[in-house]
Image (cartoon, grey):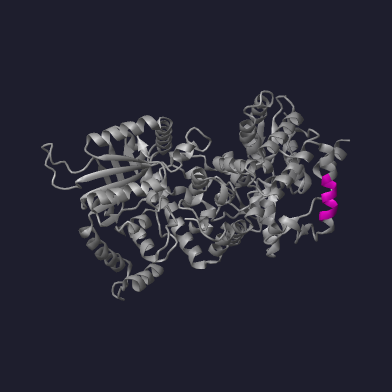
Amino acid sequence: VKVHLLVTCLVDSFFPDVGFSVVTVLERLGVQVEVPPGQTCCGQPAFNSGSWDDARAMARHLIDVFGDSDVPVIVPSGSCGDMVIHQAPELLHDDREYGPRAKALAARTHEFTQFVVDVLGVTDVNATAAGRVAYHPACHGLRGLGLDRQPKALLDQVKGIERCPLDDELTCCGFGGLFAVKMSEISGSLLDRKMASIERSGADTVVATDVSCLMHIGGGLRRQGKPVKVKHLAELLAEKRS
Amino acid sequence: VSSPVTFYERVDKALKDRALGAAMSRATTTLMAGRRRGFDGLAHADEIRDHARAIRAHTVARLGDYLRQFEAAVTARGGHVHWAETAEQAVEIVAGIARQHGCRTAVKSKSMVSEEIELNDALEKAGVDVLETDLGEFIVQIDRDHPSHIVAPIIHKSKEQVAESFRTKLGATPDDLKDVPSMTAFARRALRAGFLKADMGISGGNFGVAETGSLCIVTNEGNGRLTTTLPRVHVALMGIERLVPTLADLGVMLQILGRSAMGQKLTVYTNIISGPRRQHDGSGESDGPDHFHVVLVDNGRSRLLGGELAEILYCIRCGACLNACPVYQQVGGHAYGSVYPGPIGAVLTPGLRGLGEWSDLPQASSLCGACREVCPVRIDIPRMLLSLRDRSTEEGETPSWVTAGLWFLRYLAERPRAFRLAQRAARVASRAASRDGWISFVPGHLSRWTDRRDFPALAPRSFMERWEARTR
């Protein structure tokens, strides 16, 4: 199987290790990974902030970069995944050229854990890690893509970890893109609530399927001097001990 | 209810109010747990919600036809239908009905439309005494407060705060306030006297049934039934969109309304009112009002028909989206400054009143989707918040640092080489400002991020750079 990786601008710029963890896991499963050059940002920041013309332009660029093949596109983010799968086709609905291409791209795009579990049919990726791990379901993945069973099934098979469920699991961490800046106080109060839930869980590591939420939660934990680490689920799945 | 302070100031005040935070957390947790239990016990819940949505969509799509059918049916049963295009017209119609029938005292059951048109003030000015009879609304009235939730008006208050209001405003004794049943009995005595005295009853309407001209009012306190049967005149206020075609359709709605609002299979009282007391047609009814008036209020709703916000007219005012919303849970209803708070209010308010002073409301969401998930008629509220943000940008209400920043992001995103260059520049700057890969202060607008959280520096080498090196 060959796939194209949509690495996402946040992983590319801030968390390249996450991208390589995705590659490691996929290659371990016999998948050949290619990374189309020229990819930048899917346009979600502009879409969520109401700059829809800018979002359309970025979506068109993304479509050009990924071309018109049948190769599955893998994205390690429920949020960017929701943008490509649901929002871009809607945004480009009236565009004669890009409308149909947006739909075609949406049809072959998969969030990373959905691809592994639902398409490849694998839940045990032969990962061994350590620590007490809490899973934070990122909202766009959870409610936009229905992502819940897949990441949990993958986590269930990771050897050597102890699971620490969050009691306030389904509540947003308050990130919301520019919301965290425009409405910093509301966002911050939600972040406090999420961090309190993490603390009660006794976890030493929080995993999620979106680096955006992790950047928010991780930034909050670090500001408060909490020793809890944040990791993309792919990083945990890539770990393998002899 | 516009407030002199800004949205940000109201939010700030709310977040600092610990009693409010505790009350909101307790109440919304209870309501959400109730909702879950309510739906757990309902077979085919998803199909019923789909069906309910289809009924609402159909009704809103053919609203003109159903309104005419409803008017004809109400009139045939001896009632009167009044049309109010604006809030001013609506209050003038109600004041006129009071004058026509010589009414001086009115009892009211809960109606959000009456809040929307600010009816109480207008009636008091017209010389009509108004008594709110929903317990929560009664407390709102004696406090000269505003409801902070569309179903639970005093969700923001604790029982201790209510006891204090009863003591200072109504002279309740320690014995009246010794526990919640005593407090309720105290309020009941005050309300009962009002019911017996009133010559006008004002209610809202949860649904109007087009085929029969019936009005459905659900309550949990029985005050709605007294309001609509004891006084000699009954006036019901209803948004024009609150119709269902048939009684069978009403049955579908009632299955989801109580469950979504409070986790109840059915509210304690479900009233279906079809016309005034019938005296002259041989049925000889001995109770009910002599006169029955329905005021159908537009007040901006018809402008939404056919547009991208039309779906908000499917709303059945259950309040589930408020209870589920993490933002509403944190700041409460008053912070919104609008009659309708929470996710529904963040769409409805700018939809009915225009963005203008309400342009912050659609921004007050992380777009987490919890509202869409619980909405019994599956209204895609996040989608409409996004539409309103797009409209904000078109109308020049979006701050220029946001639009300029995103324009620049687009400029770079369309030009991968420029994107890489900018990435490198940002990397150098951010790494210089960082310690252990994190920055504790970013200047400019992004400083609002670093008020509460550290920000990561860009990685020493981007994924794309490392990938190129690996495959070269």
Residue B130 occupies quadrant: bottom left
Asked if residue B228 is positioned above or below residue B72 in the image, the reply reads below
The kind of secondary structure the magenta stretch mainly shows is: helix
**Residue sitting at 59 percent across and 42 percent down?**
B386
* Residue A30 shows in the view: no
Q: Position of residue B132 (x, y in %)?
A: 32, 58
Q: Is residue A83 left or right of residue B131?
A: right
Magenta highlight range: B422-430
User: Taking the image as drawn, is residue B343 in sight?
Assistant: yes
Q: Position of residue B446 (x, y in %)?
A: 72, 55
User: Is B429 included in the stretch rendered in magenta?
Assistant: yes
Whether residue B224 is situated above or below residue B135 in the rendered picture: above
The quadrant of the image that shows the N terminus of chain A is top right
Give the number of marks.
0
In the displayed structure image, the side of residue A156 where residue B97 appears, left or right: left
Kindly give the residue lying farthest to the right in the view shown.
B472
User: Is B329 rendered above or below residue B344?
Assistant: below
Q: Position of residue B104 (x, y in %)?
A: 25, 57
Furthest residue in direction bottom, as rendered: B174
Instruction: Give whichever of B16, B63 is nearer the camera.
Output: B63
- Residue B363 position, x and y percent, is 59, 49
Residue at image coords 85%, 58%: B432
Reply yes or no: does residue B382 show up in magenta: no
Q: Is residue B197 left or right of residue A226?
A: left
Image point (42%, 44%), residue name: B86
**Closer to us: B240 or A223:** B240
Judging depth in this view, the residue of B188 and B359 nearest the camera is B359
Residue placed at 14% from the left, 43% from the top?
Answer: B285
